[in-house]
Image (spheres, helix red, strand yellow):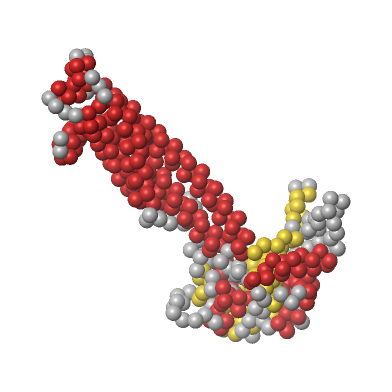
Amino acid sequence: MTFGNLLRTAWVGIFANRLRAGLTSLGIMIGVASVIATLALGNGTRAVVEAKFRSLGSDQVQITAKYKLEDGERVPAGKILSYEDGLLMPESSQLIDHVDMMVYAVGRARHGKVVLSNVTIKGTMGTYLLSSSIKKHLQPAGWNDDDDLEVDSYLMAGRFFTPAEILMSAEVCVLAFQTAEDLFEGSDPVGEIIRVNRKSFEVIGVLTELESLDSSQSNLSQFNEGIFLPVSTTIEGLLDEEPSVTIIAHVTNEGQMDQAKAEIVAYLRARHEIEQNLDGYYEDDFQITTKNELIGAQQEAARTFSFLLMALACVSLLVGGIGIMNVMLVSVTERMQEIGVRRAVGARRQDIALQFLVEALILSSVSGFLGLALGIMLIPITASLHQGIALLDLSSLPLSFGVALLTGVVFGLYPAVHASRMDPIMALHYE
């Protein structure tokens, strides 16, 4: 029997039971769509993780204070990370080039009759703009990618504060783009005085409108709203209690990252008077992370999540395969006399087996194509449930379709062999 005759015979057999064949195809179709959507979600998750920590350079060590729950409240696990901890850190190790420190607060800003409540106050170092230009996770809105980013590229007017102003706790500030627009309503803020939490500060600069290169951070207000103050000024002049600062240490040699971390740990343990307990362990009140550690932990969680989703998709494919086997076995039973007639007129066993195997392949291939279309259509829905990130991997399309075909072959093989082994005489007399 020619392959063309096999296809025609298989189509006739499937078309004779259209509803049953359609319902059988659902399992594989859903399984294929699930595989595509799962892989897209996994790729999107990894992209989100990498983008989230792109701002933390590979030469940086981030140090934050540990917290614990006490009577339902989040309190420091020990001593806080103080401004002095960060200020003296470069002196403790030759592997530390310099440190950046950050602290955040919420306040009230006023200029003339304009009052802004719940304004984010960002206490930073003078290297804030330099770090942004090096990391390239922020850029001026509408920036040409071919142009080099420099510190001045982030300033619309004025300047940022200097290291000397940080050491002197100078009462100066830099306004984010939207905050400057809201406070001064289009006029030039540089040189003007604003009041933040009833304290006066001179505006020495205004940032240009910024946009994030991270597509998962679509809320532009977090970059374009706020008031930047020297970290020392924020701690000493605006807050009633000394806060814990976030310290980012810049290591001189990335190859000696582990040694630098060990020296930072030793320095902070000495500063915070942390000693070994009876079990020989240190109960540190701080935690140290690097970019690779953060990305590795997050991606491991993302891989586990993707694996669970893939397992569900495989279960769907298994159910679809069992459905194909069930339908093919029913079809063999219903068409026993046809099998007997074909064997009686000279059809070989392999011809019978191929006929039913081709029917299973047609069912699985049609299901695979429909599953590909459904999976691609599901990607935008998946993205909307996951920070707008789901990336289609083109290699998943032939992979998913191949899995569908393999399912048809595996689960269609037994019914095909079963049909080919029937005794022609018994098949002809079957009622």
| Residue toward you, 208 or 137 | 137
Q: Quadrant of residue 344?
A: top left
Q: Quadrant of residue 366?
A: top left
Q: Is residue 124 visible?
A: no
The quadrant in which the C terminus is found is: top left
- Identify the residue at image location x=44%, y=41%: 313
**Residue situated furthest left in the rendering:** 345
- Identify the residue at image location x=25%, y=27%: 420
Q: Quadrant of residue 19?
A: top left
- Identify the residue at image location x=79%, y=66%: 266
Locate residue 377 relative to residue 228 in the image: left or right. left
Q: Position of residue 328 (x, y in %)?
A: 29, 28
Q: Position of residue 26 (x, y in %)?
A: 34, 36
Q: Position of residue 312 (x, y in %)?
A: 47, 40
Q: Position of residue 273 (x, y in %)?
A: 86, 63
- Total labels: the figure holds 0
The quadrant in which the N terminus is found is: top left
Locate residue 23 relative to residue 9 in the image: left or right. right
- Identify the residue at image location x=40%, y=55%: 393
| Residue toward you, 174 or 8 | 8
Q: Is residue 172 visible?
A: yes
